[in-house]
Amino acid sequence: MTSHQLADELRRVATTQVSDITRAVKEGQKSIALNEVRDMARRLSLLADAFDPKSATEKAEPQDGAQAA
């Protein structure tokens, strides 16, 4: 993924999600707004993992001394 493609995708995610969040807040729908915030965080995380797969692998592996739940 090039830096231009990354920038375009970030703009798309931000524009779409912020628009949905704003609409939900204006309509007084807090649960929908919170779901949109969670969805934006998930999308940004997936984008970050796609851009830097090594960081996704590091997150999946437990740290030294950490135990799986």
Image (cartoon, rainbow, N blue to C red):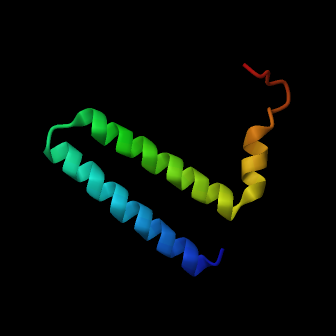
Total of numbered circles in the picture? 0
Q: Residue at x 80, y 32 (%)?
A: 62
Q: Residue at x 29, y 33 (%)?
A: 31
- Residue 30, quarter of picture: top left
- Residue 4, quarter of picture: bottom right
Q: Residue at x 77, y 22 (%)?
A: 68
Tell me: residue 31, above or below residue 22. Answer: above
Q: Quick one: 55 or 65, which is closer to the camera?
A: 55
Q: Give the image location of residue 39, x and y in percent.
A: 44, 46
Q: Give the image location of residue 5, x and y in percent.
A: 56, 77
Q: Give the image location of residue 6, x and y in percent.
A: 56, 72
Tell me: residue 1, above or below residue 28. Answer: below
Query: Left or right: 33 with respect to 64?
Result: left
Quarter of the picture holding the C terminus: top right
- Residue 16, quarter of picture: bottom left
Query: Left or right: 12 with respect to 25?
Result: right
Quarter of the picture holding the N terminus: bottom right
Q: Residue at x 38, y 44 (%)?
A: 37
**Extreme residue toward the left, this view:** 27
Tell me: residue 33, above or below residue 15. Answer: above
Query: Left or right: 61 with respect to 7?
Result: right
**Extreme residue toward the right, this view:** 64
Q: Give the image location of residue 23, x and y in percent.
A: 20, 51
Tell me: residue 35, above or below residue 43. Answer: above
